[in-house]
Image (cartoon, helix red, strand yellow):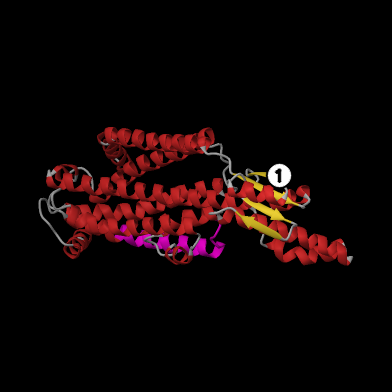
């Protein structure tokens, strides 16, 4: 029987043996994605539109409204009503208004006025007074533009802010997907190897195929399942997000999705080979955790860093660790999503990670060979690697 045919048979054997677990986990993940987005959509639909009520005494309300709205989220409702000074102060005490603007130079705040309300009002008043003073001094529009440049430079671009928030959220999602995929399918490989070694099934299989063929078959089978699940979750998330949240994807989302698949494949091969090697060291499933557990720490660190760094916008540490092969598959897709990665960084990360993956596969293959052939025995990494080298040389 030819080698490709043997590999195909073992691949289908692995897929068939994991079909129920794959279907259950896929349904659960899709349910979590759809359910979570549906709940988020329901919550956002019930949120009240922010409303600011301002009283005005001897102020041009049209100009004041225009200047304040330039510094507010467009969805915010701004109500400005004209008052006499005494009536305005009374309305302020009765919490009918949030602020009282007097003569464009003074503002009285309601108790507990939040900063997000105060800043647009004070900025709007300052700009309005600057415009009036410029007119009194006979300054041209060009002069006024130069005067307002520092102020306009501080104006919040809410569309850009929302896009940045969406990119950060998607970056965190990519970290979670990569972590779950690597951890779940890596451990499937590890515990599958442990079971075959403990039950002596590996001995029967190795009578027909080589250890390398067996390892390759496992990697292809479980990697295919993992990639299928990843694509299903991503597509379902995009469709459900558009349905329940009606969000627009950032411009880099399509490119980042392609890179996500690339990094999943690289990360899966890198970690999958290490998980297979660690599983071959244990004598049975009871002691498998002592070998697999320490390996879980590596992707776990990348996961924790990603979910903390991307929402905060601080990517200094993420920038450094995304160049290290252990964490590149988890962090680089998120950096691509946020647009914070330089071309040279991406190229360097690919070279380093692919190179490290080649080394990891070669070392893990020898460890796997030396461990899987010693049935019902616990062996160390060094013993398994030496045993694999001896068998390869023989």
Q: Residue at x 13, y 49 (%)?
A: 286
The percent position of residue 344, horizontal first and vertical second, equals: 54, 65
Q: Residue furthest left?
A: 376
Q: Quadrant of residue 126?
A: bottom right
Magenta range is 339-362
Would you say 227 lies left or right of 49 here? left
What residue did someone put label 1 on? 81
The percent position of residue 107, horizontal first and vertical second, equals: 67, 57
Q: Does residue 133 sit above or below 245 in this rendering?
A: below
Would you say 131 lies left or right of 184 here? right
The percent position of residue 374, horizontal first and vertical second, equals: 13, 54
Q: Does residue 357 sit above or below 188 in this rendering?
A: below
Q: Is residue 145 visible?
A: yes
Q: Residue at x 80, y 60 (%)?
A: 131
Q: Is residue 73 visible?
A: no
Q: Quadrant of residue 125?
A: bottom right
Q: Quadrant of residue 144?
A: bottom right
The residue closer to the viewer here, 256 or 314, is 314
Disc 1 on helix, strand or loop?
A: strand
Q: Residue furthest right?
A: 138
Q: Residue at x 25, y 52 (%)?
A: 276
Based on the picture, tell me whether residue 173 belongs to the magenta stretch. no
């Amino acid at each position: 029987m030819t080698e490709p045919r043997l590999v195909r048979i073992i691949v289908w054997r692995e897929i068939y043996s994991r079909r129920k677990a794959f279907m259950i986990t896929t349904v659960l993940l899709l349910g979590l994605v759809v359910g979570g987005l549906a709940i988020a959509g329901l919550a956002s639909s019930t949120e009240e539109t922010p409303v600011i009520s301002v009283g005005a005494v001897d102020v041009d309300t049209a100009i004041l409204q225009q200047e304040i709205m330039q510094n507010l989220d467009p969805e915010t409702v701004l109500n400005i009503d004209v008052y006499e000074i005494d009536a305005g102060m009374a309305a302020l005490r009765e919490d009918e208004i949030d602020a009282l603007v007097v003569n464009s130079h003074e503002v009285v705040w309601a108790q507990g006025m939040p900063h997000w309300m105060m800043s647009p009002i004070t900025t709007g008043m300052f700009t309005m007074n600057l415009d009036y003073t410029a007119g009194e001094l006979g300054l041209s529009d060009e002069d006024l533009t130069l005067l307002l440049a520092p102020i306009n430079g501080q104006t919040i671009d809410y569309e850009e802010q929302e896009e940045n928030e969406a990119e950060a959220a998607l970056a965190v999602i990519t970290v979670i997907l990569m972590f779950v995929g690597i951890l779940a399918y890596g451990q499937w490989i590890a515990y599958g190897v442990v079971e075959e070694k403990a039950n002596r099934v590996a001995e029967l299989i190795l009578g027909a195929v080589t250890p390398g063929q067996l390892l390759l078959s496992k990697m292809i089978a479980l990697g295919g399942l993992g990639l299928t699940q990843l694509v299903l979750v991503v597509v379902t998330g995009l469709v459900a997000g558009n349905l329940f949240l009606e969000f627009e994807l950032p411009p880099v989302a399509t490119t980042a999705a392609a890179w996500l698949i690339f990094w999943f494949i690289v990360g899966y091969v890198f970690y999958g080979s290490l998980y297979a090697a660690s599983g071959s060291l244990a004598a049975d499933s009871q002691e498998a955790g002592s070998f697999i557990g320490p390996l879980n720490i590596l992707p776990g660190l990348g996961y924790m860093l990603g979910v903390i760094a991307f929402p905060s916008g601080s990517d200094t540490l993420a920038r450094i660790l995304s160049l290290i092969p252990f964490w590149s598959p988890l962090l680089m897709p998120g950096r691509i999503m946020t647009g914070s990665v330089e071309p040279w960084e991406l190229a360097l990360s690919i070279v380093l990670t692919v190179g490290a993956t080649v080394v990891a596969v070669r070392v893990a293959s020898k460890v796997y060979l030396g461990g899987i052939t010693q049935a019902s025995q616990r062996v160390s990494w060094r013993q398994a690697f030496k045993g694999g080298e001896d068998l390869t040389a023989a």
